[in-house]
Image (cartoon, rainbow, N blue to C red):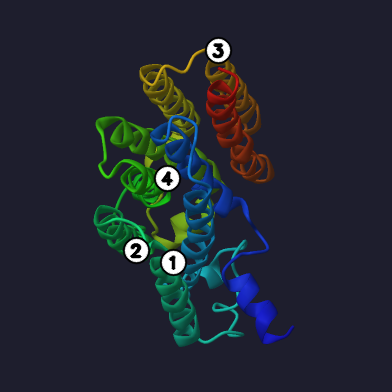
Amino acid sequence: MNRLQLYFRLVRLNKPIGILLLLWPTLWALWLASDGKPDWTLVAIFTLGTVLMRSAGCAINDYADRDFDKYVQRTVDRPVTSGKIQPREALLVALVLALLSLSLIWPLNTLTKQLSIAAVIIAGTYPYFKRFFAIPQAYLGIAFGFGIPMGFAAVQGSVPTAAWLLLLANVFWAVAYDTEYAMVDREDDLKLGMKTSAITFGRYDVAAVMLCYAMTLGLIFFVGWQFGLRTWFTAGILIAAACAIYHYTLIRKRERGDCFAAFLHNNWLGAAIFSGVALDYLLR
């Protein structure tokens, strides 16, 4: 395997689910902030920025977890853990990608630039929250949803209450899908003393996931209704709810493969919400 392939694996471009889970909330925000008529230059900037920041986050995550991943079945072959990429290389890759992402924001307004600095700090510190924070997935939700206030700031020059409610919805969504993800690694994480929501929730993990889905969809529905979205938006929310119910059928037995499948399927939940928002504006 050549160096380029190793870097490709380091930043998980071979596993785009993380990019999509970052992108959908950002697109919700851009469409809502612009009344369904986003500037396509902004859409391009935020889409490319999402790819770069997620990639940087993966590199810093592998650096932070290099001494733990070797004991986890799913991560033992990652480039840094396996020694194919040196830790300092991963740090350098993360730095370069983060700087490229920040450069994209340069033409935008001051508030967006200020929020982008906060986004980089949050993304860079997330891997260390697993050492002490009982539900690090909530912090992940802030990191994965920070495109929401940034999107509103870029379009409107301010961050209204609706944007923070959407960010809160994304926190609940991240707790839901990343708990499903954490249920895959629960036995390994217990041995390592890592903190995850799957461990914190214990035997109430499935109930907690479903409650988080309910909070996510309830908050998004409330925000969308305030923006005057109706029929198609409601249809999108109902499809997303059906996705959540499907996830319940996958995770209720807590089998590793099914829990991971539920995590991956969250792409369709996010897509359903975005489709409802976009179609409601388009077909008015």
Q: Earlier in the sequence, mark 2 or mark 4?
A: 2
Three-letter code for the amino acid on which mark 1 is drawn: Ser
Q: Is residue 131 left or right of residue 228?
A: left
Q: Residue at x 35, y 57 (%)?
A: 108
Q: Earlier in the sequence, mark 1 or mark 3?
A: 1
SS class, disc 2: helix
Residue hosting label 3: 231
How far apart in space, not on screen, are marks 1 and 4 (Cα)? Answer: 34 Å
Residue hosting label 2: 120
The answer to whether the residues at label 1 and label 4 have Cβ atoms under 8 Å apart is no
Q: Earlier in the sequence, mark 1 or mark 4?
A: 1
Q: Residue at x 36, y 65 (%)?
A: 106
Q: Earlier in the sequence, mark 3 or mark 2?
A: 2
Residue hosting label 4: 199
What numbered label is drawn on residue 101? Answer: 1
Please state, as top left, top right, bottom left or bottom right, where the N terminus lies in the image.
bottom right
Q: Quadrant of residue 121?
A: bottom left
